[in-house]
Image (tube, rainbow, N blue to C red):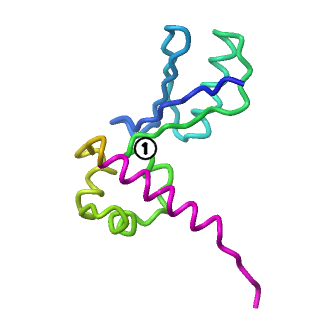
Amino acid sequence: MKKIQLIIERGPDKKFWGRILIEDNLIVDSAETVGELDLKMKALLNQFHDMNIEQLDHAYDISAFFDNFNFLNQSKIAQLTNINASLLRQYSSGNKFPSFKQTQKIEHAIHQLAKELSMVTLISG
């Protein structure tokens, strides 16, 4: 099955904006949540391209990522990436934009955290 990437950004209106490019057709919509955006984009793919997609691959800009996953500790991610915490907060707020290299460092740190979390075992007392 073909993977379709949904690029998610945070607009000045504080909504999540998504875009998908299919067959030279740019599909764009917005929503209050990523889940709602995902559903709307799947419906548009079905409507315009007769595609019934179960899952879209999400690609976030930094601001949208930290808004959607706001439970993550930005200071810890800054520490893991060796990026100044204040600078990372400016990236997440959309006041500044990271370079490609900085974006890769942040993505690597997030993947590393996810890997560590997936290995956690909890016990009850």
Magenta span of residues: 102-125
User: Is 1 covered by the magenta stretch?
Assistant: no
User: Residue 111, relative to residue 42: is it above or below?
Assistant: below
User: Is 117 covered by the magenta stretch?
Assistant: yes
User: Which residue is drawn at the image coordinates 67% and 23% (left, top)?
Assistant: 2
User: Residue 115, relative to residue 123: is it above or below?
Assistant: above
Query: Quadrant where the C terminus lies?
Result: bottom right
User: Which residue is drawn at the image coordinates 46% and 31% (left, top)?
Assistant: 17
- As shown in the figure, which amino acid type bears the numbered disc 1? Ala
Task: Tell whether 65 sits left or right of 52.
Answer: left
Percent position (x, y) of residue 56? 63, 32
When asked about the image quadrant of residue 64, the answer is top left
Task: Tell whether 42 sits left or right of 79.
Answer: right
User: Which residue is drawn at the image coordinates 57% and 33% (left, top)?
Assistant: 37
Graded by Cα atoms within 10 Å as few (under 14), some (14 to 19) or many (20 or more), the crowding at tag 1 reads many
Percent position (x, y) of residue 54? 73, 30
Identify the residue at the far right of this view: 124
Secondary structure type for disc 1: helix
